[in-house]
Image (cartoon, helix red, strand yellow):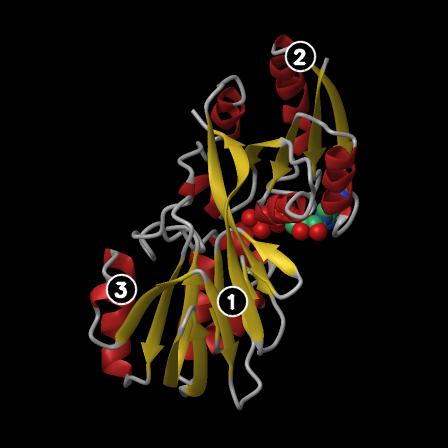
Amino acid sequence: MKQAMIIVNPSSGKEEAVDYVEQIEEILEAKEYKVNTVQTEKELDATQYCSDACKDEYDLVVSLGGDGTLNETINGMVDQKHRPKLGIVPLGTVNDFARALNISLDPKEAIETLKSDLTKKVDIGSFNERYFVNIVAVGSIAEATSEVSPEQKTKFGPLAYLMEGAKTLASTNAYPLRIEYDDKVWEGESFLFLAALTKSTAGFEKLSPEAKVNDGVLHCYVVKNVNMIRMASIVTSVLRGTLKEDKDVEYFKAKKLHVTSSEKLHTNVDGEEGDLLPVTMEVKPQHIEVIID
Ligand SMILES: Nc1ncnc2c1ncn2[C@@H]1O[C@H](COP(=O)(O)OP(=O)(O)OP(=O)(O)O)[C@@H](O)[C@H]1O
C-alpha cells in the first residue's frame, strides 16, 4: 500500500491547520494511501519528520502550513536518495511557493489539488549548508525584512515586507559586492542583490516574472548604487514586473554563485534570516516533484 505523511504546523496561519486534516486524510485514503499525520511543535520538526518519511520510502508528503513549514519540509528531502512527491496546502500569510506553482491560496481549494495525478518537477537552490525554494536577498533590505514580526504579517500580510523594506530605503548606502557566477564575475557597488528561483517574493508576484520553477537557473538582479529618485523608479519597476529592464539593474542568469563583500552583509533566505556573506548558491534542477492541477 502507498504511504503518505501529512506534516501539520498547528501554529501556522490563523491556527486553523488541524481543522483541515480530516479533509486531507479522506482524499488521500480515497487514493489508497495509508496516512500518517504528524504535528510539529517547534522549529525543524518538519525537517526531521520529512527526512524520516524519505528513509521509510513514503510515496507522498503533504505540508500543511506556511512557507516556513514548507521550507523545513523540503530541507528534509533534498539530500535524500528516495524523495516522496510533495503536496502543498498553504496556510501562511505569503505563500510564495504556492503562488509560483499556481496552487490556490484558499486552503480548501488547495486540498482539492491533492486529488490530481499531475505533478511538476521543480528546482531547488542550495545556500551554503541549507536549501531554499524562492529567493535569496543580500543587503540592508534583506536584513530589515528578516525582522518582520508574525504580528505584522498577520495584520498587514505581504505589505508588512514592503513597509519594513521602505524604511531602510531612506537610510541605506550601497556596499561593495563581488559576485562570481558560472565563469563570469560582477563586481561593484550595489544596493540590493536578489537571486530568484521563482516569480513570487513576499507576495509580489511580478518581482521576477522571467523565473520559471523548472528552468534550472537562478535569476539574478543587482540593483546598483542609485539616488532616492532612481530608487523610487526601481520600486515602480518591481511593481510592474520590469525590474530586469531598468537601466540601473544588472540582470543575469546563473547555475552557481559565490557572493562576497569586504563588508559584513546580511542575507535573507526565503523570508528568513540567512548566513552572513560569503555565501555559495547552486541550483539543483527539477529536484522535487510537486502535485499540481
Ligand atoms: N507547534 C508549533 N508552535 C510554534 N511554532 C512552530 C510549531 N511548529 C513549527 N513551528 C515553527 O513555526 C514557523 C512558522 O511557521 P509557518 O511559516 O509555516 O507559518 P506562518 O508563520 O503562519 O506562515 P507565514 O510565515 O507565511 O506567515 C516554522 O518555521 C516552524 O519552525
Rate crowding at label 2 as few (under 14), some (14 to 19) or many (20 or more) other CA atoms within 10 Å.
some
Of label 3 and label 2, which has the lower sequence position? Answer: 2
Q: Nearer the viewer, mark 1 or mark 2?
A: 2
Splitting the image into 4 quarters, where does residue 8 fall?
top right
Query: For the view shown, which residue lies furthest in the bottom direction?
Result: 262
Disc 1: which residue: 145
Q: CA distance from mark 3 to mark 2?
A: 45 Å
Q: Amino acid at mark 1?
A: Thr
Query: For the view shown, which residue lies furthest in the front direction?
Result: 183
In the image shown, does 118 or 45 lie closer to the viewer? 118
Residue occupying image coordinates x 44% and y 32%: 104
Q: Nearer the viewer, mark 3 or mark 1?
A: 3
Residue occupying image coordinates x 60% and y 61%: 149
In the image shown, does 19 or 249 lie closer to the viewer? 249
Residue occupying image coordinates x 54% and y 24%: 111
Disc 3: which residue: 243
